[in-house]
Image (cartoon, helix red, strand yellow):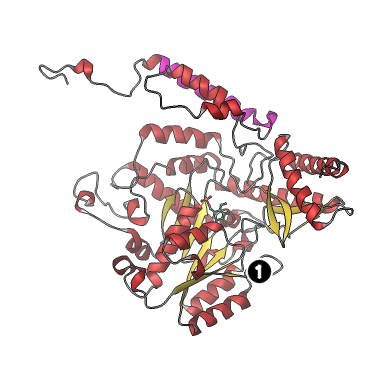
Amino acid sequence: MKRENEDVESEETLDPNDWESTRKLGHKMLDDMLDYVKTVRRRPVWQQVPEPVKAHFSVPVPQQPQPPEEIYKEFVEKVLPYPMGNIHPRFWGWILGTGTVMGAFAELLAASMNTNTGGCSNHVANYVEKQVIDWIKEMIGYPVAASGVLTSGCSAANIIGLTVARNAKAGFDVRRKGLQRASQAMVLYASQEVHSSIQKAVELIGLGKESLRLLPVNNYFQMDLGALKAAIMKDREAGCLPFCVVGAAGTTNTGSIDDLNALADLCQRENLWFHVDGAFGAWASIAPKARNKVAGMERADSLALDLHKWMYMPYEIGCVLVRHEAQHREAFSLTPDYLAHGECRLGLTGGDLPWFSDYGFQLSRGFRALKAWMSLKEHGSRKYARMIQQNIDQARYLGELVKASPELELAAPVALNVVCFRYVAPELDDAELDELNKRIIIELQEQGVAVLSGTVIKGRHVMRAANVNHRSRREDFEVVVREIIRIGKELTADCSL
Ligand SMILES: Cc1ncc(COP(=O)(O)O)c(C=O)c1O
């Protein structure tokens, strides 16, 4: 409203000056992105960012405005051609999700609403988040009474789960007194194959990495239960306080799954917190022929998982579930005057609706739930179950192709959706084969054929394909095997190796 003597014209906004040209640009962006995703198969999986393009991102901050059309043109020329490649059907490196079109649309809608789901429960995004968390529990068979919160990913989910575990099992008020006042060193257990985010979480919550006992694994890369029992006993004798076991539902290296029921039994007997890192493997629980592999996961006190990996949703979205809501809330809830709950209509704590900031370390939080809600409605849980089973079957198919090729050998059993294998040549020793396998990964990437990543299994460098890709087809695995053998032969024939 124009007030007297006020120069309204001098007030600025960041909204478009010209809504019509902005609308046109937005429509073009949408059209271009649909074509981009639709035609992804035709492009190389990855390509090197050229030096001039890198230099383009090393300039001072712009002080003057640029026309939106020009900015978009710059994006199309300098950004779009050099992605990580993980939306491509032949990307199986590390463990990277592929995203979906509806997920991308949802990101636009959520950003347009620009809702903050940290505080104030009386707006609809909180209902959507609660709905999504309920659906996750229903799909994976976790107790309905559990609390949960969507996170940036599984690293954050692991931090939250282990914080609740630490506070619940410390035997004193950690939030008030801090770990300095602990009379015993708190220790926890995981296998050597556990993801690095667990160590980071342990360091961040003040326990120090030495408190994380990394136990050996059996031939299936599962935690050695005898070693676990012995370690707990030894720590108790030494005056430490064992408080938690971290089970893996899908290790990053090989996709192996710990014996989760056995770990749950042991935790029950020994009064230990049972945390499961199910970043991707938790979703095996919905695959018709794989769900028995993660049996026992539903007994976890806390469970960390991702939706941006094996639920194919665009980055970032993970989730942590905690069996006992009160323990979860007690670890994070903090209500200064300026965040008083329920003092106004918007802040109202209504019925079962939480302030999600009471269940994690973030206050401001985006509307991540929308992409999950829209994606699950678009496809339905049964389609996701089929997609996950398809990825598992494809991984097994790749394993069979490897076994059928004399030039290749499996480096670990194919437990789920991860295949570790190695190019072999009788004339080369182990050290030379290590180098050869590393070079094949690089050549595959540089030639734009496929992206695999590497890892070390039993001391040897191997290639690793982790399949959470809803665009892959069986023929893609045939291509990668054929190309690996071609490149392997070319490199071994080349004396420069
Ligand atoms: C088993 C496991 N746990 C945790 C993480 C960390 O998850 P995020 O990358 O979503 O933080 C990963 C990532 O690959 C993982 O594979």
Taking the spot 19% from the left edge, 17% from the top edge, the residue there is 8
Please name the residue that numbered disc 1 is placed on. Answer: 217
Q: Magenta region, mostly helix, strand or loop? A: helix
Q: Is mark 1 within 8 Å of ligand 1?
A: no
> The C terminus appears in which quarter of the rendering?
top right
Q: What span is in magenta?
A: 21-44
Does residue 42 show up magenta in the picture?
yes
Depth check: 315 or 129 in front?
315
Residue furthest out toward the front: 496
Decide: few, some or many residues near mark 1? Use Cα within 10 Å; few <14, some 14-19, many ≥20: some
* Secondary structure beneath label 1: loop
* Residue 157, magenta (yes or no): no
Amino acid tagged 1: Val
- Looking at the picture, how far across and down is residue 19, in whole percent? 37, 17
Q: Is residue 146 above or below residue 473?
A: below
- Taking the spot 41% from the left edge, 56% from the top edge, the residue there is 148
Q: Is residue 272 left or right of residue 87?
A: left
Q: Is residue 356 visible?
A: yes
Q: x, y percentage for residue 94?
A: 63, 48
- Name the residue at 85% across, 45% down: 492
Q: What is the residue that sits farthest to the left in this orientation? A: 4
Q: In the visual, does 214 lie left or right of 127? A: right
